Amino acid sequence: MRRVWVLLLLILAQPAIAIDTGRAFEDPELQERYEDIIAQVRCLKCQNQSIKDSNVFLAADLRREIRRLLSEGKTDDEVFDFLVERYGEFALYSPRKSGKTLILWFAPLLLLAGGALIGFRVIRRRMAMPLEDEPLAE
């Protein structure tokens, strides 16, 4: 009988375990902005989830802070500025294009160009090599 009660309590406690079950704002536009922002912010503890999907205390605290900033009338950029100032660029899934992060944005292009250049040089050298079945000039 005791197991039945424990199982019943676990089933009834499921909504309490869920992440942000209620709406943060009554205004649909503000709610959409809130959802968009929390999807773009990385959970600093999990590091593989957004704070929208994470249920750790730090993510819940960040969601509350973002909710407070939006209710004060802050813009999305001001919210992101606050998060970057407090936690660094790592807090955002997509780092901003600035002097510090230019290498992140251009490194793939530079690596691709470097690989193409190396490939081109290898192919040119191989084409210039004599074939094995050709007799060597004496």
Image (cartoon, helix red, strand yellow):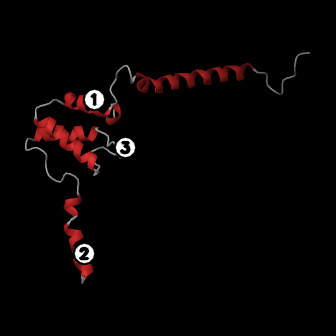
Q: Which residue is label 2 attached to?
A: 6
Residue, x 15% and y 35% (percent of image)?
A: 69
SS label for mark 3: loop
Which amino acid, by three-letter code, is at mark 2? Val
Q: Residues within 10 Å of mark 1 (few under 14, many from 20)?
A: few
Residue with the most extreme bottom position = 1
In the foreground, 106 or 125: 106
Which amino acid, by three-letter code, is at mark 3? Gln
Labels 2 and 1: the sequence-earlier one? 2
Looking at the rendered image, the quarter that the C terminus falls into is top right
Q: Position of residue 116 (x, y in %)?
A: 56, 23
> Which disc, if any, is residue 47?
3
| Residue 50 in view in this figure | yes
Q: In this picture, is 40 found above or below 2? A: above
In this rendering, the label closer to the viewer, 2 or 1: 1
In the foreground, 130 or 94: 94
Looking at the rendered image, the quarter that the N terminus falls into is bottom left
Q: Which residue is label 1 attached to?
A: 85
Residue, x 19% and y 38% (percent of image)?
A: 66
In this rendering, the label closer to the viewer, 1 or 3: 1
